[in-house]
Amino acid sequence: MQYSDFNRYIPSRGTMTWDLGQTFTGTFRADGQLFYGKMIYVSGDTYEGPFENGKRSGNGTYTGKNGERATGTFIDGKMNGQFVRTKADGFSQKETWRMGKFMSDRALANEAEEKRFAAEKRAAELADAKKRALEAQKFRERIELIENHRKNKIEQCLYAEVKNITNEYQKNIIEKSCQKKINNRYERIYKKCEKSIDGYDFQNLINRIFK
């Protein structure tokens, strides 16, 4: 590689020539990397525009040796996005590229369809998540009402059964009997609630309430 009018230590303009004949004329960065200019390749094709890490990067124009030009955005050396291709006779047309791959009308239609499908799927997932959250909230409210009702029933049972009993041992036996009777009744109610709510971890709730 040979250099002319090039200082590798400060930003400058100059020309760089490779051994095979490829040349670049333009602006260099302070570290010697290509910045902006015109590259003439061995094939005779040229590119004029910005560079990043030695690759075409940004808005530039690639011209074939037949005079055909493609103007648009380059990323990592590849054509990406909307391009205007101008033939040697002056006729121009718009094209779409994805990281160096030409996108035909059919490919663009497929891409749009995939994006639409992905958006619809995401919307359906969000709607389903919202529905489940509402169902879970209703379930929690229902359980809270049932739990409060269960506690009230136990208190009523205890009051009716032990209000005239003074023996503490007998009171404890009656209290356990009341709790068991009421809990058995409400456990069946909880199981009915479980069947009406899909995906809710009901067993953990049962274990917490009836432990």
Image (cartoon, helix red, strand yellow):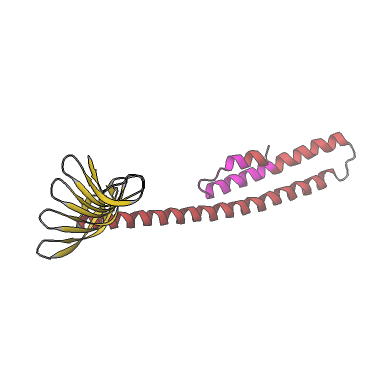
Q: Residue furthest top?
A: 169
Left or right of 94: which side holds 36? right
Is residue 27 visible from the viewing direction of this image? no
Q: Residue furthest right?
A: 166
Q: Residue furthest front?
A: 5
**Closest to the observer, 192 or 202:** 202
Where the N terminus falls, by quadrant?
top left
Above/below status of 155 relative to 82: above
- Count of marks placed on residues: 0
Q: Quadrant of residue 113?
A: bottom left
Above/below status of 120 relative to 1: below
Is residue 20 visible from the viewing direction of this image? yes
Give the x, y percent position of residue 102: 20, 53
**Closest to the observer, 180 or 210:** 210
**Closest to the observer, 49 or 105:** 49
Q: Is residue 38 magenta?
A: no
**Closest to the observer, 204 or 64:** 64
Q: Is residue 204 magenta?
A: yes
Give the x, y percent position of residue 56: 27, 50
Residue at image location 56% in from the left, 46% down from the top: 194
Left or right of 1: which side holds 135? right
Residue span colored magenta? 183-205
Give the x, y percent position of residue 62: 20, 55
Left or right of 110: which side holds 153? right
Where the C terminus falls, by quadrant?
top right
Residue at image location 70% in from the left, 48% down from the top: 150
Most prominent secondary structure in the magenta stretch? helix
